[in-house]
Image (tube, rainbow, N blue to C red):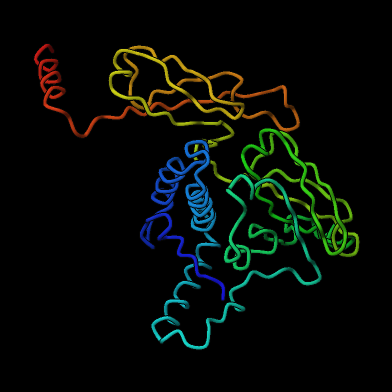
Amino acid sequence: MMDYQDYYKILNVDRKASKDEIKRAYRKLAMKYHPDQNQGDASAEEKFKQINEAYQVLNDDDKRAHFDRLGSAYKDWQQHGGQGGFNWNQWTGGRPEGMRVEYNGDLGDMFGGGFSDFFQSIFGSMGGFGSMRTDPRQSQFNRARAQKPYEIEMSISLHEAYNGSTRQIKINDNKYDVKIPVGSKTGTKVRMRGAGPNNSDVHLVIKVAPDPRFEIRNDRLHTFVDIDLPTAVLGGEVTVPTLSGNIILSIPPGTQPSQTFRLKGKGMPKLNDRSNLGALFVNIQVKIPQELTPEQKELFEKLAKLK
């Protein structure tokens, strides 16, 4: 029997939580259990995988709605004694008629060994991420003359978008090695000529999966770094993650909360142009201590009198 996954419980959020609340909970937990922070800890790696899986569902309106309906049916089944086994068949993700699609890549490895059977069974035909539809933007003239291209939504990691990658895709009994271009972003399309039914085209529509350390805003790459109050006041150094490795950033004295530093050449590359790198924007978050020792409190009181 397949185990039910409670994604709200995994992220420790209410079932009515907003997208912003879900994102904050995800980022907090993902940073805590990120493999870079817990090297060699198998339990943290498994927790990190669960956190990412939960966010993939709850941050997607369609997947979340489907999960909510499933959860209600599963809870009702439990309340009535849970006899006879839960009927999973009506909840598993389907495939367009006549098409069987599989793909592989490094996204599952990045998330600690792939996605659970529950996720893959419930949320799609391509490792749990996929949706497939005909392109509604073709003109009536083209629709009359040609087969409509199919669109396959393919999630890739931010590192794949940064470096480019190759995915192997199996459509029906045919295998294709597809190059994901450097600098891909959500919405980028990769065309596969004649790979669909009756030699129709297939478009891979890229979706860049969230990364707990980075955020893309209007094609700009942002990261968030915590510093303590003394560093903000006196200056110092802090480690900043980038997609090409960690670097040391000098923090000038008097740095303000939410101040942003622009690091040229440390952001995302332009599409198909690895040499043309954008900037990384480092957002500083000053951590204000919530508890003080008597000595620390005395020092702050002295400081306040010097104003």
Q: Name the side, left or right, on which 292 lies relative to 169.
A: left
Q: In this view, does 227 lie to the left or right of 5?
A: left
In the displayed structure image, the side of residue 142 where residue 162 appears, left or right: left
Residue at x-position 42% and y-position 77%: 75
- 121 versus 155 height, above or below: below
Tell me residue 127's x, y (percent). 67, 58
Residue at 71% over, 50% down: 205
**Is the N terminus in the top left, top right, bottom left or bottom right quadrant?**
bottom right
89 up-or-down from 12: above or below? below
220 or 29, nearer to the observer: 29
List x then y, in percent, for residue 105. Answer: 71, 48
Residue 157 on image: x %, y %? 63, 43
Q: Is residue 48 above or below residue 128?
A: above
| Residue in view at x 62 percent, y 26 percent | 244
Q: Decide which of 221, 26 is in the foreground and name it.
A: 26
Residue for point 75% across, 41% down: 180
